[in-house]
Image (cartoon, rainbow, N blue to C red):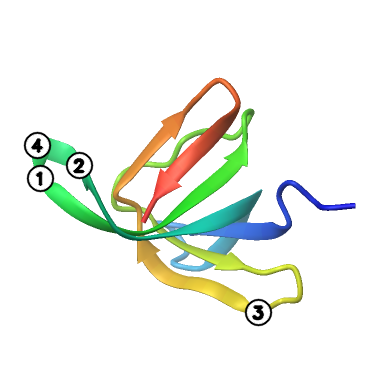
């Protein structure tokens, strides 16, 4: 059976500067997509991360990393461009 959220999302703590587990997730490559971030500045997106709907959205500028199902690093030291809490899931663009 396919897992809906097979990866692990870690967020860098501003107090300890260490990565802490945040949520289960999945990521989709979004290379080349352009979205508007803060102050209507256009950003090129590297990846879109999906988390379960009960996951709180992240602040813009948070540093994240995604570890895969087999402990491989999928994304490392990426900055959050935008995050939204939607009806079916929470989306994070990096």
- Secondary structure under badge 4? helix
Q: Which residue is label 2 attached to?
A: 37
C-alpha distance separating marks 2 and 4: 6 Å
Q: Are marks 2 and 1 in contact (CB under 8 Å)?
A: yes
Q: Which mark is residue 39?
A: 4
- Secondary structure under badge 3? loop
C-alpha distance separating marks 4 and 1: 6 Å
Q: Which mark is residue 32?
A: none
- The crowding category of the residue bearing disc 1, from other C-alpha atoms within 10 Å (few below 14, some 14 to 19, many at least 20), is few
The answer to which of marks 3 and 4 sits earlier in the sequence is 4
8 vs 73: above or below: above
Q: Are marks 2 and 4 in contact (CB under 8 Å)?
A: yes
* 39 lies left or right of 56: left
- Residue 73's x, y, as percent? 58, 77
Q: Are marks 4 and 1 in contact (CB under 8 Å)?
A: yes
Q: Which residue is label 1 attached to?
A: 41
The answer to which of marks 2 and 3 sits earlier in the sequence is 2
Q: Which mark is residue 72?
A: 3
């Amino acid at each position: 059976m396919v897992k809906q959220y097979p990866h692990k999302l870690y967020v860098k703590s501003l107090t300890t500067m260490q990565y802490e587990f945040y949520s289960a997730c999945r990521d989709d490559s979004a290379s080349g997509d352009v979205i508007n971030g803060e102050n209507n500045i256009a950003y090129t997106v590297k990846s879109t991360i999906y988390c379960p709907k009960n996951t709180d959205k992240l602040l813009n500028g948070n540093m994240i990393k995604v570890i895969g199902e087999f402990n491989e690093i999928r994304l490392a030291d990426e900055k959050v461009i935008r995050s939204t809490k939607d009806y079916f899931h929470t989306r994070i663009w990096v």
